[in-house]
């Protein structure tokens, strides 16, 4: 009887498994300034994602059909399980500009605020639910966006220093719970990971947004 009970408990637990992973966004400061100065209406940056629990060819084909820039897919070990790593594209645009974002999971928007420019990260709700429905129907799992670690690699490829402001983040491994300013000299690179509470806030997809970083 105990063996049967344990079996059904294990089976039941599978129905409530949720998957998380990593989201790593590569950003170049020249792209940001080109978009904000209208030299380019929209530019596309690279995003690497690791998603737990996805590893077969059907998953790959579904993602390829639904995500712009899907490429470089391969299996990796993540949290002691086989997971899928892949690259996608994310548009960077100025607040007020519009594009067809139906197959972009992430969008980065810049908005001028007095002497600085704030940059916001938004998930595409419709596309997210489309992917989540597929994963649930195929693997009996849900995507939990609040279980994804959001990481940024910001490269200063301009020929001048820039002042970078981060919010509730780890900067090069050091925690800064509030606003923190760093000066990036030419060719400097910095790694940022949003705090768990900040990532959870963004994953709720509320209308009220808060910048993930700013540049002065």
Image (tube, grey):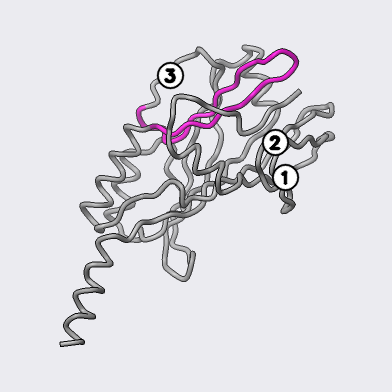
The numbered mark, 1 or 2, whose residue comes first in the sequence reads: 2
Query: Residue at the location (25% across, 47% down)?
Result: 134
Residue 56 is a magenta residue = no
Q: CA distance from mark 3 to mark 1?
A: 34 Å
Residue 106 is a magenta residue = yes
The numbered mark, 3 or 1, whose residue comes first in the sequence reads: 3
| Span shown in magenta | 102-124
Q: CA distance from mark 1 to mark 2?
A: 8 Å
Q: Residues within 10 Å of mark 2 (few under 14, many from 20)?
A: many
From the viewer's perspective, is residue 207 above or below residue 141? above
Q: Main secondary structure of the magenta part?
A: strand
Q: Position of residue 7 (x, y in %)?
A: 21, 79
Q: Which structural element holds mark 2?
A: strand
Question: Is disc 1 in contact with disc 2, using a CB cutoff of under 8 Å?
Answer: yes
The numbered disc on residue 99 is 3
Picture quarter with the N terminus: bottom left
Q: Position of residue 55 (x, y in %)?
A: 35, 61
Question: Is disc 2 in contact with disc 3, using a CB cutoff of under 8 Å?
Answer: no
Q: Is residue 35 rendered to the left or right of residue 18? A: right
Q: Which structural element holds mark 3?
A: loop
Q: Position of residue 195 (x, y in %)?
A: 60, 47
The numbered disc on residue 166 is 2
From the viewer's perspective, is residue 106 above or below residue 16? above
- The image quadrant that residue 213 belongs to is top right
Q: CA distance from mark 2 to mark 3?
A: 27 Å
Q: Closer to the camera: disc 1 or disc 2?
A: 1
Q: Closer to the camera: disc 2 or disc 3?
A: 2
The numbered disc on residue 33 is none
Q: Closer to the camera: disc 3 or disc 1?
A: 1
The numbered mark, 2 or 3, whose residue comes first in the sequence reads: 3
């Amino acid at each position: 009887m105990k063996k049967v009970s344990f079996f059904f408990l294990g089976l039941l637990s599978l129905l409530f498994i949720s998957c998380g992973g990593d989201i790593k966004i590569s950003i170049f400061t020249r792209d940001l300034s080109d978009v904000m100065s209208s030299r380019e209406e929209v530019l596309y940056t690279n995003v690497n994602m690791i998603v737990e629990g996805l590893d077969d060819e059907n998953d790959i084909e579904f993602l390829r059909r639904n995500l712009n820039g899907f490429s470089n897919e391969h299996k990796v070990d993540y949290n002691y399980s086989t997971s899928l790593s892949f690259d996608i594209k994310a548009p960077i645009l100025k607040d007020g500009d519009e594009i067809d974002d139906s197959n972009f999971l992430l969008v980065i928007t810049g908005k001028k605020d007095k002497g600085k420019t704030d940059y916001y990260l938004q998930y595409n709700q419709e596309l997210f639910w489309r992917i989540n429905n597929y994963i649930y129907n195929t693997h009996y799992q849900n995507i939990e966006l609040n279980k994804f670690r959001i990481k940024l690699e910001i490269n200063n490829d301009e020929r001048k220093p820039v002042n970078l402001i981060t919010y509730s983040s780890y900067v090069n491994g050091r925690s800064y719970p509030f606003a923190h300013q760093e000066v990036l000299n030419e060719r400097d690179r910095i790694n940022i990971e949003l705090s768990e509470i900040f990532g959870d806030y963004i994953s709720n997809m509320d209308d009220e947004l808060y910048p993930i970083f700013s540049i002065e």
